[in-house]
Amino acid sequence: MPTADFEPYPDEIPKITRALERLQVEFEFTPMNESNKRIFEMSAHNEFGEAGFLVQIEWKEIYKNGLPTGIHLPHLEVTGRNKVEEEHDHDRHQWGVVKGLADGQPGYVRESGEKREDPLKKNIY
């Protein structure tokens, strides 16, 4: 079951970013009336579904001076993966952090939270 506290692996972040970018390009200048909202929702589910994710969409209305403007913005939340995992794959997460996929800086995270370029233990093999 999808959860709101879903945490993507570092190598999944570019997939999520690409799905968001494709939606932005497709709907950038589209007024969000009821039929376009439904089309957006179907496109979002398809884009994220192809990338392997489940997404929840909530519509927020813009107010100006306390009055509704009739302009709606989507709030997307990735809630899980299409393929359910029994538990978090820590080795996969560690690989993404070491390669710099998480924050763009490759390295190892020590217990203190400090990030270093070399591992704590050297591999002698």
Image: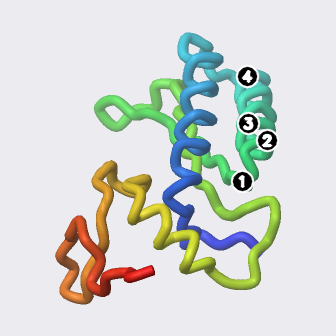
Query: As displayed, is residue 2 above or below residue 42?
Result: below
What is the distance, in whole Å, between disc 2 and disc 1 at their CAs?
A: 7 Å
First of labels 4, 3 by sequence position: 4
Q: Which mark is residue 53?
A: 1
Could you tell me which residue is drawn at 37 percent across and 55 percent down? 100
What is the distance, in whole Å, between disc 2 and disc 4 at their CAs?
A: 21 Å
As shown in the figure, which amino acid type bears the numbered disc 3? Glu
Q: What is the secondary structure assignment of the residue under circle 4?
A: helix
What is the distance, in whole Å, between disc 4 and disc 3 at their CAs?
A: 16 Å
Q: What is the secondary structure assignment of the residue under circle 1?
A: strand
As shown in the figure, which amino acid type bears the numbered disc 4? Asn
Mark 3: few/some/many CA within 10 Å (<14, 14-19, 20+): many
Query: As displayed, is residue 98 above or below residue 22?
Result: below
What is the distance, in whole Å, between disc 2 and disc 3 at their CAs?
A: 5 Å
As shown in the figure, which amino acid type bears the numbered disc 1? Phe
What is the distance, in whole Å, between disc 4 and disc 1 at their CAs?
A: 22 Å
Q: Position of residue 67 (x, y in %)?
A: 40, 32
Q: Position of residue 94 (x, y in %)?
A: 47, 72
What residue is pinned by disc 3? 47
Q: Which mark is residue 36?
A: 4
